[in-house]
Amino acid sequence: MKRVRLLALGLAALAVTWVGPAASGPPLPVLFQSAPGRFEVAAVDVGGAQRVVAQATEAWQLLAGPLALPEAFPSPVFVRLIPSKEWTEPAPFRVFVEVGGVVSVRVRWAEATPEILVRRALVQGLLMRQAVARHGVSERLAAPLWLEQACVGWWRTRAEPALLDALKQSTAHRVPPALDQLLNWRRGEAEPVELSEGAVWLLAFLRSESGRPQEWSTFLQRLLGGEAPDAALAAAFPARFENTRERELWWQTGWHHLRRVRTLPGLEAAESRVDLADLGRFVVLRDGREVVMTLRDVLGQVGEPAVAEELTKRATAFNRVLPAVHPFYRNAALSFGELLAARDKSAKRHAALWAAFEADWRDAYELEKASAGALEAIELGRSLSSNPNLLLR
């Protein structure tokens, strides 16, 4: 079967399917799904599979905005954890794109497998799945090394905001890497910290420069489709520079500006909405079928050990997200936190808290839509003032 192959150097859902051990021979893997159409993780090591599916869930939550991910793909990213004693490849993980668009990730697995390696494998798989979704199966599909490193860094600094401060300190007195060096960074080359940290700032810079959302999205999709990065950048960000020298100045100015911004890391309104929605969505296996439940539904079953354990995991993930929630969704997040903490309360109390959460959620969504509409109107006004001929079309 023909494959497009990449070499890499370098909150779990309640639905669990057990593929039981055969009468003889090695045990078969356990399957976990982060959510339908997102990630499916299989491993003989149950604890390892649980850890990786939790990371996969977090990856989707924090990268949905930067990677313009859909609600779900027609088929998930299939992740297989291969015991290290059975691994024969020189690279620690590999990503495959099969004919038909199936994307699979194989990871050399042991208890001591570094978290950063798993994160890179998940990110590379996610990039390739998005590439397939946008362009179909092609030999040209690409997951650029700088973008992989940037997404891993974005994920880490959003999951643990203190790491953003550490990144700022680490790059405080450093000259930014040349843009050409970052964009054309290839697998198999050295991976100095200067480039991996520079990649995070490049991702943040290009997103901040995207006056219209389609500019960053256009650049991303052109990259994933295999277009040369120089051409993709010029096409996606027109009128920002006229030559290589101006382009480099544009980037270096942006580097210094972003690095010096003294604000706490925060999520955008849409990112906050997606993260809270994911935290409040539970997939449960009932009679062989996956059923989606709300937090209010799950609280009614808190006496079940599996449910209690899952709520503890969600509470941990929620506490990570809360400091970065956008102001529009702050009240909704606080109401959600009250629900998570109301495990031993009565059904009547659960209903009251749920009603408060729904009201806060509606207010937040209306604010988000109103703000987006106002910004679009401002952008349209600027476009008309700079080009009055648009009124004649």
Image: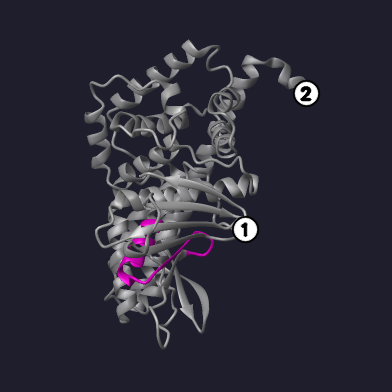
* Residue designated by label 1: 1
Which amino acid type is shown beneath numbered disc 2?
Arg
Residue visible at 38% across and 69% down in the picture: 352
Asked if the stretch drawn in magenta spans residue 52, the answer is yes
Numbered mark located on residue 393 in the image:
2
Is disc 1 placed on a helix, strand or loop? Answer: loop
Residues at marks 1 and 2, CA–CA distance in whole angstroms: 51 Å
Please state the extent of the stretch shown in magenta in the rendering.
35-57
Q: Nearer the viewer, mark 1 or mark 2?
A: 1
Q: Is residue 174 left or right of residue 72?
A: left
Choose between 129 and 315: the one closer to the eye: 129
Residue visible at 22% across and 29% down in the picture: 169
Question: Which quadrant: the N terminus?
Answer: bottom right
Asked if the stretch drawn in magenta spans residue 65, the answer is no
Is 381 drawn above or below residue 111 in the view shown?
above
Dividing the picture into quadrants, the one containing residue 50 is bottom left
Total number of numbered labels? 2
Where is residue 107 shown, x and y percent of the image? 39, 57
Where is residue 244 shown, x and y percent of the image? 50, 13
* Residue 338 visible at all: no
Question: Which quadrant: the C terminus?
Answer: top right
Which amino acid type is shown beneath numbered disc 1?
Met
Is disc 2 placed on a helix, strand or loop? Answer: loop
Choose between 161 and 342: the one closer to the eye: 161
